[in-house]
Image (cartoon, rainbow, N blue to C red):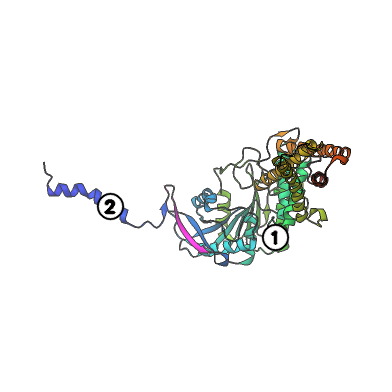
Amino acid sequence: MLLSRKRWTWSLLPVLLAIALCALPVPAHAHADALVTSDVTFTGDGGVTLRGTVVAPKTAKGRRPGIVMVHGAGPVTREEFRDEAEAYAKRGIVTLIYDKRTVGYSTLRRNYETLAGDALAAVRALRARADVNPAMVGIWGLSEGAWVAPIAAARSSDVAFLIVAGAVGTTPARQQAWAYGERLRHAGVRGSLTLMLQERAIRFGIGSGLFGEEDRDPMRSWEHVHQPVLALWGTLDREAMPAESSQIIRQGLENGGNSHYTVHFIAGVRHNLNRTFDDGFDRPDSLAADYAEFEAAWITGLSDGPPEAGADQPPSQDRLSRPVDGPFAWYESPWLQLAAFTIFLGAALGYALAAIIRRLRRRRGAPPVSRPARWLAIAITASTLGFLGYFCVLVLTGAYLIGPVVLGRSLPWLALQLLAVAVVVAAVATAVATWRHRRELSPGNRIRLGMVLAAAAVFVPWAVYWGVLLP
């Protein structure tokens, strides 16, 4: 049966309404939990285009306070702080998160002044929004961002307040050495691996220029910060030395005449204020239910005037940090270390190549020194490449991938130590056999053996310096 025109019109009405709604422009994505997000672009330091997202309360009336969240170390994107931004927005704070620059920044090459310029550009972008009170826009910085944030605040009065989480009060090199020691001790590691990471690796990074901003003194910035400051640390922060750093930063603020600060320690959370299930030495992404509650209340309370100086009792810190910079000995030169690696691999691979050529030419009567020399070449190669690989893993992961620990030593380090001992044993055997059969050796064999024995002679002090031949 055909529908009447009236009934036909009413039946199509819902469809027509749905089509009309879909055709409307949607400037931002609305969350079911009363948040609204919008993407933004702005120009950072040096003209670099940066992209971010603003997370805001959906039902907020009037202009709200705002914060710019500044990243920790590494190539971080805005998604790293998505949960944190939403936690602040749910509590009435308009929050801007953005992708960290990839131009002019890497893990090995960084400049905090440049990153501070990016943070100030983000502040300007947030201040320009109609839903933000431009006189109440601050910067929130985590870890490396807690180095950048005070630099930005000291440069511009546009920054109304400062919140730092996991801030460090010493140079980055000194802090990193302390953190290495904490992780190794937590894993049950004792002995020379601690020496290698806490001192040798840090000094090599400094000398080679691969440890960006290694000697920056944070006091230079904190003494020039005059805005209200909220400094936060987790009581289980195993990276930023909470007790030591909080005292230094407080002293820096007071040296500059700033008494409007609050120092607060959050129980049961780690370096990035996330929860922890391993005493602060793990890295789960899990925020506490009341995350940002204290901070948001502190921000909104600024409307009543800046806070007076106040600080919680800091958590205990068993070991203080120690300086790792200072004069470098001649044998610590990165070029000398590179030369040592070249000698090790050149001599060992040269010996192996000569042996292959000898076989291809079908020469018989291998010299009696061949067996120990062959093992010496193999041991030097394995020890050198193994050390380089393990060193890179430890440094690039921040000593989080140590490996299983047995008798106070990680298994990879124990294997490297055994290889180093094998180099010494094979070198002694090769030297003895060479002396005994010196009259039987051809000039070519003497050159080959001299090269591999010279490499072993250099290897021994090198292995002692790096701790591979130490207990």
- Mark yes or no: residue 67 visible: yes
Asked whether, in this view, residue 181 is left or right of residue 282, the answer is right
Residue type beneath disc 1: Leu
Location of the C terminus by quadrant is: top right
Q: Is residue 36 magenta?
A: yes
Which label lies toward us, 1 or 2?
2
Please rate how many residues cluster around mark 2, counting C-alpha atoms within 10 Å: few if below 14, some from 14 to 19, many from 20.
few
Between residue 25 and residue 244, name the one nearer to us: 25
Magenta segment, principal secondary structure? Answer: strand
Say above or below: 114 vs 457.
below
Boundaries of the magenta span: 31-43
Please rate how many residues cluster around mark 1, counting C-alpha atoms within 10 Å: few if below 14, some from 14 to 19, many from 20.
many
Q: Quadrant of residue 429?
A: top right
Residue that mark 1 sits on: 253
**Sequence-first tag of 1 and 2:** 2
Label 2, secondary structure: give it: helix
Residue that mark 2 sits on: 19
Location of the N terminus by quadrant is: top left
Asked whether, in this view, residue 437 is left or right of residue 167, the answer is right
Between residue 173 and residue 291, name the one nearer to us: 173
